[in-house]
Image: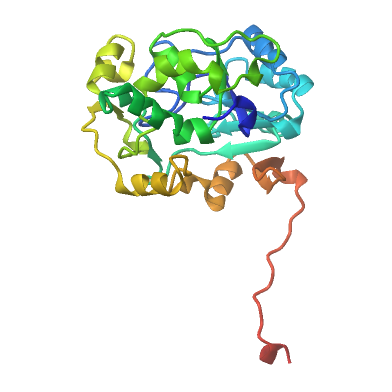
Amino acid sequence: MRAILQSDTLQVEWTSRCVLSCSDCTHFSGSYYKHPELSFEQFKDIVDSLEGYPGMIGAIGGDPVITKDFEKMCLYAQTKIPRAHHGLWTTFPKGYEHFRELICATFGNILLNDHTLSNIMHAPILVAIDEVVPDEDDMFLIVDQCWLANRWSPVVNGKGAFFCEVAGSMAQLFQGSDGWKLEPGWWKKTPKDYGPQMNEFCRKCGCALPLERRASVDGRDDISPGNMEKLKGKSRKVDKGKVVVSEFKMDPELQKAQQMGGGTALYPNQVYKDQEYRRQIAAKYGIVLVMNERGYWDPRLKETVPYIPPAPPAQSLFHII
């Protein structure tokens, strides 16, 4: 497990609302009866608490673009977060194209994924590890090597700050304990501070295990029997039967990746990172993506990027002569 300052990005969950209802969403967007969403005052408090944080600050959801106070929050963020250190995770939902200039002015890093590819696979988050690995010592040894906690991001949402995105989401869905208070420098916390959050939320999560994944377009959530019982009356998907009770099957490909990477191997086959896939999503908003120093895409208004004609096909020396 790593310290928060070792993460590339610290996420702020603007809203859990989304135009999609993907299977096994890390923020449970399709599960809520009443979606958690930051008020403008909550957002200001969060941003102010991140003063001095040296990494990238991400806007995530759900889909931040459909947040009620999106414009107001962006304008405040511009006064506090340098564009080069601000990221946006979004689907670029239809009907919000008028925010294109605001997006380009606010965010210098963007990750686009509209989940239209059938081979985008999601981990079975709601399959509780403590229902698969009953020995607590063994369970927490596995959790300590969780690929998500060691590769993804800490998060802040309406319930406070959390060492892991999924822990923050679970606190909201399960109506669990609040996260850390937004005191100055809270983001300097290290694994020795994670104990209570890990004990409450990691045991409900399946990300640390190489379980079989589900296509995001499926729309159903994988869930273990214990979690299903806990979420009755709290989860729209559970109550409407849009879940699949897990058989706890392991994925040989993931098992091999974890063995080779010491448990923190990058999740394989992340096809949504394909350049052409993201370019087509950006084009819907009239935005061009330019690679930046961080290895993320910098959104630019199409009309501000000079047209560069494609290079002519290569010719052999024989044809040149």
Residue 14: percent from the left, percent from the top?
57, 19
**As displayed, is residue 216 above or below residue 54?**
below
Q: Is residue 190 left or right of residue 249?
A: right
In which image quadrant can residue 52 be found?
top right
**As displayed, is residue 238 above or below residue 213?**
above
Residue 254: percent from the left, percent from the top?
36, 45
Query: Which residue does the image show at 74% across and 45% down from the upper left?
Result: 303
In which image quadrant can residue 131 be found?
top left
Query: Which residue does the image show at 73% across and 59% down from the upper left?
Result: 308
**As displayed, is residue 252 above or below residue 57?**
below
In which image quadrant can residue 73 be found?
top right
Query: Which residue does the image show at 44% across and 33% down from the upper left?
Result: 146
Query: Which residue does the image show at 37% across and 28% down from the upper left?
Result: 125
Residue 82: percent from the left, percent from the top?
77, 28
Using the image as rendered, state which of residue 278 and residue 148 is in the foreground: 148
Residue 119: percent from the left, percent from the top?
38, 46
Q: Is residue 202 left or right of residue 130?
A: right
Using the image as rendered, state which of residue 127 and residue 130 is in the foreground: 130
